[in-house]
Image: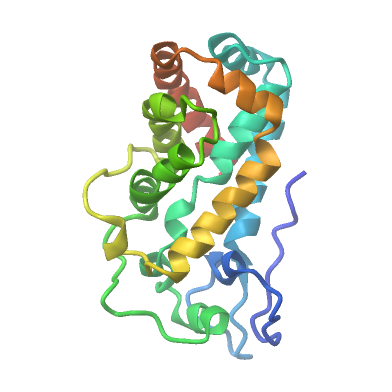
Amino acid sequence: MPTQESEFDLKTPADSRRGAADRYWGKARPSADSAGSAPCHLLVHHSLDVAAVAVEALRRLPALRRQFTSRLGLSNTQPASWVGFWVALHDLGKFSEAFQSQCPDVFIALRHRASNPAKPYSLRHDSLGMLFWKDVLRDVTIDEAWFGPASEDLADGFDWWARACTGHHGQPPTEGDFWAQHFDTHHDRDAALSFFREVQRFFITADLTEAIAAQSPSDFLAASTELSWWLAGLTVLAD
């Protein structure tokens, strides 16, 4: 079930055990209130909330679930994990300093510094997420052979899933520009990559890896192109 949409009180002293990905807000007030509090809902929590809603929606929509099982050759239970993985990544672009800087009080409270004025929020977070996928995470998936030796051959199909989940505001993401213009190349990259790996460990089971790795690259690309439309709609609904 989704976690409660509770607020994180930034007046609380920073916990040194908090991970890098936990220093990013997903939903926040634009400034501190009269009591000096700048509450927010953390990005990792929001991302998993939306993934949980998508998984529950898929459970309640058996006809849609059958689309994923039949086109990808999955078992009846595997589409939930596959969809949950991608939907959890829908707000990757919010890991960018450009996006985070929109709430200066929250940024300072979480990061203990002011944001970099050289990284203004000039590109929407949906497009920023796709940039980060194309420039960073796609290569990680290939280099670490997440889906076996043929991971690179399947990568064009993965692009369609990434495009569908990041483009969750009614239009496809922009795919120009370069990610480092908008992200801190050290802290933002590490936080997003840490979250990416945790989501992979949580959702992508060994049997699901095997099922995706067994796909013909051409068949997987065709199925991914078709199913991306359904994922896009499901992500909008869950968000």
Q: How many numbered circles does the render carry? A: 0
Picture quadrant of residue 53:
top right
Q: Is residue 129 above or below residue 147?
A: below
Give left or right: position of 52 versus 36.
Answer: right
Quarter of the image with the C terminus is top right
**Rendered position, 70 above or below 4:** above
Which residue is at the front of the view, 226 or 169? 226
Task: Where is residue 218? Give x, y as percent.
Answer: 38, 13
Between 27 and 83, the one nearer to me in the picture: 83
Rendering coords of residue 196 (x, y %): 55, 50
Give the quarter of the image for residue 211: top right
- The residue at the point 40 percent across, 14 percent down is 222
> Residue shown at 36%/68% (left/top)?
98
Tell me what residue is drawn at x 48 percent, y 40 percent: 141
Work out whether 102 lies above or below 94.
below
Q: Classify residue 228 as left or right of residue 194.
A: left
- The answer to whether 174 appears left or right of 20 in the picture is left
**Residue shown at 38% from the left, 69% from the top:** 184
**In the image, residue 206 lies at what x, y percent?**
69, 29
Is residue 58 visible in this depiction of the protein? no
Q: Quadrant of the N terminus?
A: top right
